């Protein structure tokens, strides 16, 4: 083809597809692979049918759109299940753990120490040194409650059951 000088158009499309496929491996995002497949398909069609440049561009754009939107719909309908859904949610992984209040909670906010790190936290007003249980997270802020309240409720529940059984 004269449009590309001494290069044949199908080799340019196939090379573009391979470059885009390589970039997908370096910069993962599950987007460039569909463009790569469209470029390779355009190169193969150009090789077999001998398409002109305007038709090559139309075929590439059309195949790119079809591949990208088909993949988007497929991944939406059958998402990839993770074996560890909280992998990148460090606060979510701490739910259920206990920690120590590092700085006094005043107005419902303070800092807690879990392991070797301190976290911003929200919960009822407490003094430094109190033990808390992490019950949730909102971004980088952990939601906590005092541990003694949980233990107190657990101790009251059997007494209420024992008392009601003795009354009956």
Image (cartoon, helix red, strand yellow):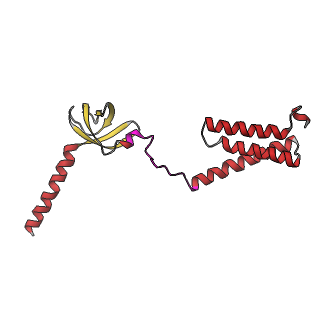
Instruction: Give the x, y percent position of residue 148.
Output: 19, 44
Establish if 122 lies above or below 166.
above
Instruction: Give the x, y percent position of residue 101.
Output: 25, 34
The answer to whether 39 appears left or right of 31 in the picture is right
The answer to whether 168 appears left or right of 140 in the picture is left
Instruction: Give the x, y percent position of residue 34.
Output: 68, 45
Magenta segment, principal secondary structure? Answer: loop
Question: Residue 110, located in which quarter of the rendered image?
Answer: top left
In the rendered image, the residue lying farthest to the right is: 2
Q: Which residue appears at 28% of the width and 39% of the height? A: 123
Q: Which residue appears at 50% of the width and 52% of the height? A: 81
The answer to whether 158 appears left or right of 141 in the picture is left
In the rendered image, the residue lying farthest to the bottom is: 168
Q: Which residue appears at 77% of the width and 44% of the height? A: 60
Which residue is nearer to you in this view: 166 or 126? Answer: 166
Instruction: Give the x, y percent position of residue 1.
Output: 90, 38
Is 164 part of what is drawn in magenta?
no
Which residue is nearer to you in this view: 130 or 24? Answer: 24
Q: Which residue appears at 77% of the width and 47% of the height? A: 41
Establish if 165 lies above or below 96.
below
Which residue is nearer to you in this view: 159 or 39? Answer: 39
Point out the stretch of residues depicted in magenta. Answer: 77-92
């Amino acid at each position: 083809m004269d449009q590309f000088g001494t290069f044949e158009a199908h080799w340019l499309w196939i090379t573009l597809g391979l470059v885009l496929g390589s970039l997908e491996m370096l910069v993962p995002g599950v987007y460039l692979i569909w463009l790569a497949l469209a470029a390779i398909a355009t190169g193969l069609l150009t090789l077999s049918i001998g398409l002109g440049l305007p038709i090559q561009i139309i075929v590439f754009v059309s195949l790119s759109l079809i591949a990208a939107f088909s993949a988007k719909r497929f991944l939406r309908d059958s998402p990839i299940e993770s074996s560890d859904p909280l992998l990148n949610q460090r606060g979510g992984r701490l739910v259920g753990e206990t920690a120590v209040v590092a700085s006094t909670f005043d107005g419902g906010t303070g800092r807690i120490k879990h392991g070797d790190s301190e976290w911003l936290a929200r919960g009822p007003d407490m003094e430094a040194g109190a033990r808390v249980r992490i019950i949730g997270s909102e971004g980088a802020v952990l939601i906590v409650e005092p541990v003694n309240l949980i233990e107190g409720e657990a101790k009251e529940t059997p007494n209420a059951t024992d008392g009601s059984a003795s009354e009956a």
